[in-house]
């Protein structure tokens, strides 16, 4: 009798734990705008801002022994693996970057490095605008749940990623 009671109690507790786990998982709300839709029978994901097209096809030359890219003043970048830009920038990724000349060079969707105190942050531009202090950009790491806390001024923008090398 005690054995049946213990088995029933263990089954109940296991069911309660599993139920709580699923309640926690199903309580996450996803905005309807983020769900893919069907268009003409094809599953179509939500459009997101992509980086500006800095390297035109005619500026890339493919050879049997290498590749050349015609790009003014390219800069090489090595990244710390912070996971904030996963999966696009991860451990072992490198990039070719350019130095922007004006705020017009910075576009929503671009991946940009900027100075924040003594740190360099590499995140995606999610908004640009003007306020009483002038031009600014707002950023968010692709893998971060919220945007970066500060408005970034052009003087703090260092480089724009134009190619990621794995």
Image (cartoon, rainbow, N blue to C red):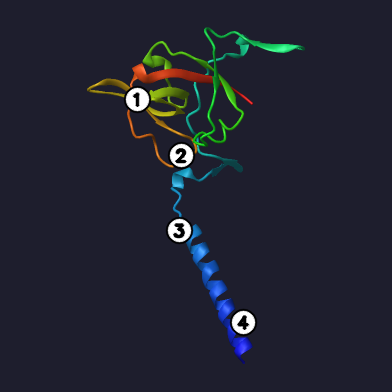
Q: Identify the mark nearer the N-term, 1 or 4.
A: 4
Callout 3 environment at 10 Å: few (<14), some (14 to 19), or many (20+)? few
Picture quadrant of residue 11: bottom right
Callout 1: SS: loop
Q: Label 1 to label 4, Cα distance in Å?
A: 60 Å
Left or right side of 102 for 1:
right
Which residue position holds label 3? 27
Q: Are marks 2 and 1 in contact (CB under 8 Å)?
A: no
In the rendered structure, find residue 144 and report the number of the disc placed on it: 2
The quarter of the rendered structure image containing the N terminus is bottom right
Q: Nearer the viewer, mark 2 or mark 4?
A: 4
Callout 2: SS: loop
Q: Residue at x 40, y 19 (%)?
A: 157
Callout 2 environment at 10 Å: few (<14), some (14 to 19), or many (20+)? few
- Relative to the observer, which residue lies in front, 95 or 41? 95
Q: Label 4 to label 3, Cα distance in Å?
A: 30 Å
Q: Which of marks 3 and 1 is in front?
A: 1
Q: Are marks 3 and 1 in contact (CB under 8 Å)?
A: no
Q: Can residue 8 be seen in this view?
A: yes
Check the image and name the residue furthest to the right. 64
In the rendered structure, find residue 19 and report the number of the disc placed on it: none
Callout 4: SS: helix
Q: Label 3 to label 1, Cα distance in Å?
A: 34 Å
Which residue position holds label 4? 7
Q: Identify the mark nearer the N-term, 4 or 3.
A: 4
Left or right side of 104 for 87:
right
Q: Identify the mark nearer the N-term, 2 or 4.
A: 4
């Amino acid at each position: 009798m005690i054995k049946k009671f213990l088995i029933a109690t263990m089954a109940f507790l296991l069911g309660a734990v599993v139920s709580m786990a699923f309640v926690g998982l199903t309580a996450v709300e996803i905005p309807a705008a983020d769900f893919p839709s069907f268009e003409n029978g094809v599953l179509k994901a939500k459009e997101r801002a992509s980086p500006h097209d800095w390297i035109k096809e005619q500026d890339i030359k493919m050879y049997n022994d290498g590749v050349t890219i015609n790009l003014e003043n390219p800069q090489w970048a090595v990244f710390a693996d912070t996971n904030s830009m996963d999966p696009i920038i991860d451990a072992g990724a490198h990039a070719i970057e350019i130095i922007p000349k004006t705020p017009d060079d910075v576009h929503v969707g671009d991946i940009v490095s900027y100075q924040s105190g003594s740190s360099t942050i590499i995140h995606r531009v999610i908004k640009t605008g003007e306020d009483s202090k002038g031009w600014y950009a707002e950023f968010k790491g692709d893998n971060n749940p919220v945007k970066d806390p500060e408005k970034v001024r052009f003087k703090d923008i260092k480089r724009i990623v134009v190619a990621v090398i794995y």
